Amino acid sequence: MGKKHIIVDPITRIEGHLRIEAVIDENNKIVDAWSSSTMFRGIETILKGRDPRDCGLMAMRICGVCTGTHYQRSIEAVEDAFKITIPKNARIVRNLIQGSLYLHDHLVHFYHLHALDFVDVVAATKADPEKTAEEAAKWAHVAGVEPYIGGAGDFKMIQDRIIKFVKEGRLGIFGNGYWGNPHYKLTPEQNLIGVAHYLKALDIQRELSKMHAIFGGKSPHPQSIVVGGVTCVQDIKNPARIALFKELLTLGRDFVKRAYLPDIYMAGTMYADEATDGNATFHASSHKGAMGKAVGGTGGGILSFMSYGDFRLDDTGFYKSDLLFPSGLVLDGDISTVHEVDPNKISEDVTHSWYKGTGAPEHPYDGTTIPEYTGLEKKEDGYAYLKTDEKYSWIKSPLYNGKKVEVGPLARMVVGYVKGDKRIKKYVDNFLTRANLPITVLFSTVGRTAARAIETELMSDVMMEWVDELAANAASGDLSTWTEFDFDKVSVDTKGMGLAEAPRGSLGHWVKIKNGKVENYQAVVPSTWNAGPRGPNGEVGAYEGAVIGTVVADPEQPLEIIRTVHSFDPCIACAVHVVDTKGKELATYKVDPTCAF
């Protein structure tokens, strides 16, 4: 049997539209892969000619999930251009708003977008509720806590609901899964635990969204961040509002520690063979301990990681503060060295993207967004395939000094760990010790998923410190929330960048201002770094590299591809060009960038 070319389109349970094409050999091992966003977005073009102080409110529409992150990064780019340092209260409030987004986003991602890649819902119908309660207690004790759901009766009630759905042939939110796939590895009892926590997480995420809105004004699309600070002074002054925030945070933190972490310990252990099989695409040299050469398991990918750093811990100003997440790069699997991030080395290439280019990768300050859709290649079998030697994605190809890098929770944990950050090292080591797993487990699909959970626990703990810091600062009489500036004096001809982290990874907004108006605007988002197509010299992107080397149990049920891609939490947003599954154009929409929202 020869090689097969398979298409997974659309990748579901993500934001936006994503297509993966792969070639598998006679052993069902993926030997090549391509990642393509099949939808176009052009927010940067809409921002040209605007008042830079208004950019944040429009830039947040880039995404329907991380709205507040784009909002803040855009505001910070303008603040960088104006050289504004915000007050302490504004710094803490922004950290709390962003931290709320992290908790909500990571929780929703694991349970409602990714967990069903590990959990077989139908298999849960065969579980013994008594043994399920014992299993839940076992993994909770690994995490050092009591189980979130501990009673056999509670598990029996949930199981009865699932059995009813299955018998009636209407699985609802659990429909269209690859149930029964041989690469599901949890026991029936473990599957029932996962489904039970999935349903509980639906309630918890609602409370976390409320927390996000306390200082943000609303969720999604918060509105309290402005150039110079924040506007929620009444919430800062009111101890009851701060107390409510802390109450909701406590609720979410309890679920993280008693459900989310135990579930990750459980899944990490049951899928540990994939995480340590040495099946990463590159750098398959022998591991030399915690600070040697990384070896990736299935889904490990390109083994180069970048973090811009985020969450300022003091008030010394832009790119000077100590950060919760350090900045840096770990390249080519070398976990003995961290390289500092130089923003001047960031560029975007469009060799394989549906945009016109200048012939060379462009720095974001000078970046262009000019669509040039060249279509798909028609095949005799009736399907349209990507023109992989040409342009094949609406996503550009970001490069750091000519290299492809992965961004996201795994990158933040790796960079922080290798850099010797005490807090990150403590949480990573605690997880690996309790799970009795080597550090190499992180360089895999399973490890990427675990890194997000480790980060979530860390964030839930440090936010408790921040909310107390805000309460103490307000109680001391400091109610300053905004730094005054003279727009006419600072906004003539300047430029600035907002480089920090979003839940999915490194996010940058770059703005050039001329005569008080936006002359050029570019955003390079986390899923641009991860989902981007080949670079100018054929460099594979993070999704592509992670999928290559994966073994698929059944090409008709590409569970393994979906599991690996989901581990990045893809977010491909905002479309104006639509095609059907066979490449036929359905409709084209022209957006006038001069029109107001």
Image (tube, helix red, strand yellow):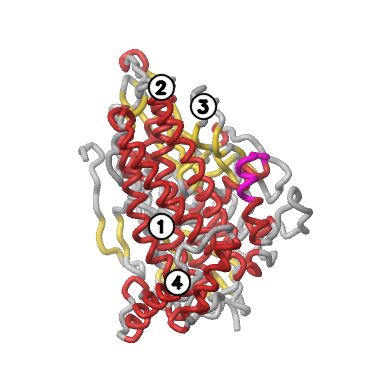
Residue at the image point whose x is 46% and y is 47% from the top: 503
Q: Earlier in the sequence, mark 3 or mark 2?
A: 3
Three-letter amino acid code at the position of disc 2: Ser
Q: Are marks 1 and 2 in contact (CB under 8 Å)?
A: no
Question: Would residue 439 be visible to someone looking at this image?
Answer: yes
Q: Earlier in the sequence, mark 4 or mark 1?
A: 1
Give the magenta part as a residue range. 419-428
Magenta highlight on residue 421 = yes
Which of the two residues, 435 or 272, is positioned nearer the viewer here? 435
Residue at numbered disc 4 = 151
Within 10 Å of disc 1 (Cα), the crowding (few <14, some 14-19, many 20+) is some
Question: Would residue 368 be visible to someone looking at this image?
Answer: no
Q: Quadrant of the N terminus?
A: bottom right
Q: Nearer the viewer, mark 4 or mark 1?
A: 4
Residue at numbered disc 2 = 476
Q: Are marks 4 and 3 in contact (CB under 8 Å)?
A: no
Residue at numbered disc 1 = 108
Q: Earlier in the sequence, mark 1 or mark 2?
A: 1
x%, y% of residue 451? 56, 53
**In the rendered image, the vertical position of residue 134 relative to residue 236, given as above or below:** below
Element on which disc 2 rests: loop
Q: Which mark is residue 314?
A: 3
Q: Earlier in the sequence, mark 1 or mark 3?
A: 1
Which of the two residues, 50 or 381, is positioned nearer the viewer here? 50
Residue at the image point whose x is 73% and y is 44% from the top: 336
Q: Which mark is residue 565?
A: none
x%, y% of residue 240? 31, 36
Element on which disc 3 rests: loop
Element on which disc 1 rests: helix
In the image, 81: left or right of 171? right
